Amino acid sequence: MRFLLSTVLTFYSLTMMAQSPEITFTTRNDTEREKKEITRVQEILEKYDLSKWIFTDKIMIESFAIPHSHPVLTLNTKPKSEDERLSTLLHEQIHWYVDENKDQEQKAIAEFKKQYKNVPHGNREGAKDEYSTYLHLIVCYLEFKSMVELVGEERAEKVMRDTNHYTWIYETVLKDQKSIGKTIARYKLNLVD
């Protein structure tokens, strides 16, 4: 009986393991810090099934880089919690998803321009320019909803509130979830329900 129970539990554990796609990692400078970050990101990929959020299978780790999605998804080694690391990975992967859906992106942004006039940009409240701030309403909304699905609303909201960049964007996403969600649904950009 013990053997049977042990076998069932082992099978259950193996089937519950995350099924994230294979990722190819590179480092910019091949430092120990960058190599450790690869291990941390791999741990996240093993812990969570991120298969529906992986749109590029190449990730560069660069110590002092600002995380970015293109041309190669690049993450840095800044100390952060597992939730912050997961959120950053999702954010950059979601950029690839939105980029694959340019027509829908353009339509959603046109609608956001009517809803939100004079958005912040060029500072920590917004993105680098006006267009990017509107784009990030989509990306950050999908990032938040993805985090909710993976770690729950409380933890997802904490990550959004604790950021020191895109502060207006994240606050707007949290405050106007329903209306932003309707726009995203209307243009079929839903990545999560």
Image (tube, rainbow, N blue to C red):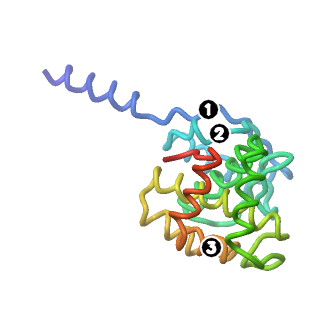
Image quadrant containing the N terminus:
top left
Residue sitting at x 82%, y 62% = 65
Residue 99, x across and y down, in percent: 77, 46
Mark 1 burial class by Cα count in 10 Å: few <14, some 14-19, many 20+: some
Residue at 64% x, 66% y is 79
Question: Eyeballing the image, is 11 above or below 31?
Answer: above
How far apart marks 3 and 2 lie (CA) works out to 23 Å
Using the image as rendered, state which of residue 191 and residue 14 is in the foreground: 191
Q: Which residue is mark 1?
A: 21
In this rendering, would 125 be left or right of 21? right
Q: Which residue is mark 3?
A: 163
Q: Position of residue 92 (x, y in %)?
A: 71, 52
Q: Are marks 1 and 3 in contact (CB under 8 Å)?
A: no
Which class describes the residues within 10 Å of circle 2: few (<14), some (14-19), or many (20+)? Answer: many
Classify mark 1: helix, strand or loop: loop
Q: Are marks 2 and 1 in contact (CB under 8 Å)?
A: yes
Disc 3 element? loop
- In the image, 111 versus 62, the foreground residue is 111
Mark 3 vs 2, N-terminal side: 2
Q: Is residue 47 above or below residue 177?
A: above
> Which is nearer the eye, 138 or 74?
138
- Which amino acid does the dot numbered 1 rest on? Pro
Give the alpha-carbon distance from disc 2 to disc 1, as whole Å.
Answer: 7 Å
Pointer 2: what residue?
54
Q: Residue at x 20, y 20 (%)?
A: 4
Disc tally is 3
Q: CA distance from mark 1 to mark 3?
A: 28 Å
Q: Residues within 10 Å of mark 3 (few under 14, many from 20)?
A: few
